Amino acid sequence: MLTITLKPGKEKSLLRRHPWIFPTAIDRIEGRPDEKNKPGATAVVQSASGQFLARAAVSPKSQIRARVWTFNENEPIDHALIKRRVKQAFAYRAAAVRETDAIRVVFGEADGFPGLVVDWYAGKAGFLVCQFQSAGVEAWKVPIVQALIAESGCPNVYERSDASVREREGLPLVTGVLAGDEPGPETPVTENGVRYAVDIKTGHKTGFYIDQRDNRRLVMEHAAGRDVLNCFCYTGGFSLAALKGGAKSVISIDSSGEALAIGKRNVELNGFDATRAEWWDADVFKTLRTLREQGKSFDLIVLDPPKFANSPDHVDRAARAYKDINLLGFQLLRPGGLLFTYSCSGAISADLFQKIVAGAANDAKVDARILRRLSAGADHPMTTSFPEGEYLKGLMLHKP
Ligand code: SAH
């Protein structure tokens, strides 16, 4: 058995049920040498005075040296726990998620699986797509996959553990079939009545940005008759929602040609009028400036950029980039227009994001009104003790 003993005072965050243990908090790790170096081995975590705090999975190579499985001394880490948690995760989604067959069924810490993401596309004949991003869940991969199949009734499981965070855990990047069939180039899903093709094997993340579902719906509800500009469109999530909602025209910009090709395909899949949609393979920063120089304007603009701040060290640089695009967004918006703007950087808080956007509005001399504060859908919950889980934040703004 492995035991992690913390330095005096370092038990505080665990007593607040925060699930991460950093090397600086650890006084010593005791156990057999082969166990100590085994990624994902379960350890008992105790305070300097020997009080039980948690059971955690050890990541010998990671800056997050251990991640908590349970704070309950009577809860063993075994197959039954894996099954129980998968069951809970599915039960919660069944109650909370509607009008889609693209669902995040496991979201890391919030579902009791630190470092595990599982997205489920297209029902029982579709695919479960997993990202194992920590040594703990990697060590329990086989029982996790079994539990996912049993709970979903979907026999096809594909692994997309190719996110760079794996390297920080000392884990190799891997992709491939874990069970059942291999996904084809297009797995069609239907979200809020819109069909989208998902490229599970080579698309971003697990193929689709499921987290923006509710926000795409909001855009759908406000798009009628509007000229829409969708920046960082990927496969056209917001663009298709806007077309469904009756947008007059939609220009979608992304720097990925593959993503744009799927976007165009999505227009076909839905039988929408392709002349209402333009797809531009371009850099958003440059294109927004060009549009401004040309005196162009829009009724509804979406800004959903990639994560600009990968860590707290990048917050300043990221803040400048967010401010830049939002300033351009306000300038390109017609009076009465709507701006939907997002940040998926965990290192940028909702408060800071709002300040950045306020600064941009101020520089653009726009008295913008915040109509709504936005976040990820209910299948991306966060826990009260783990604020790091909140990464996606956004604002719906009106330009008078
Ligand atoms: N809104 C999308 C998800 C956006 S992900 C949805 O609902 O599905 C961010 C996208 O930004 C990616 O597709 C990436 O290719 C694109 N991107 C990143 N930097 C860019 C840049 N400078 N100019 C244009 N697109 C960029």
Image: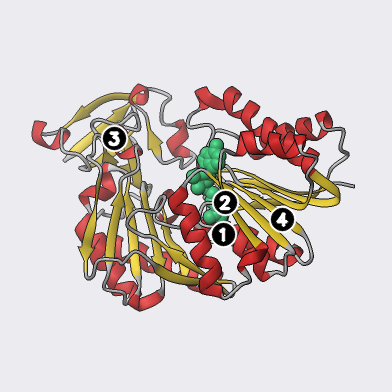
**Label for residue 233?**
2
Q: What residue is drawn where x is 72% and y is 69%?
A: 246
The yes-or-no answer for disc 3 within 8 Å of ligand 1 is: no
**Lower position in the chain sequence, tag 1 or tag 3:** 3
Question: What is the quadrant of the N terminus in the image?
Answer: top left
State the image quarter where residue 177 is shown.
Answer: bottom left
- Counting other residues with Cα less than 10 Å from the Cα at mark 1, is it few (<14), some (14-19), or many (20 or more)? many
**Label for residue 228?**
4
State the image quarter where residue 277 is shown.
Answer: bottom right
Q: In this figure, which residue is indicated by the disc labeled 3? A: 167
The yes-or-no answer for disc 4 within 8 Å of ligand 1 is: no
Measured as percent of width and height from the top left, residue 115 is found at 36, 46
Q: In this figure, which residue is indicated by the disc labeled 1? A: 237
Q: Which amino acid type corresponds to the residue marked 3 in the rendered image?
A: Glu
Q: Are marks 1 and 2 in contact (CB under 8 Å)?
A: yes
Judging depth in this view, the residue of 369 and 246 nearest the camera is: 246
Q: How many marks?
A: 4
Spatial CA distance of label 1 from label 2 is 7 Å
Judging depth in this view, the residue of 156 and 400 nearest the camera is: 400
The yes-or-no answer for disc 1 within 8 Å of ligand 1 is: yes
**Lower position in the chain sequence, tag 4 or tag 3:** 3
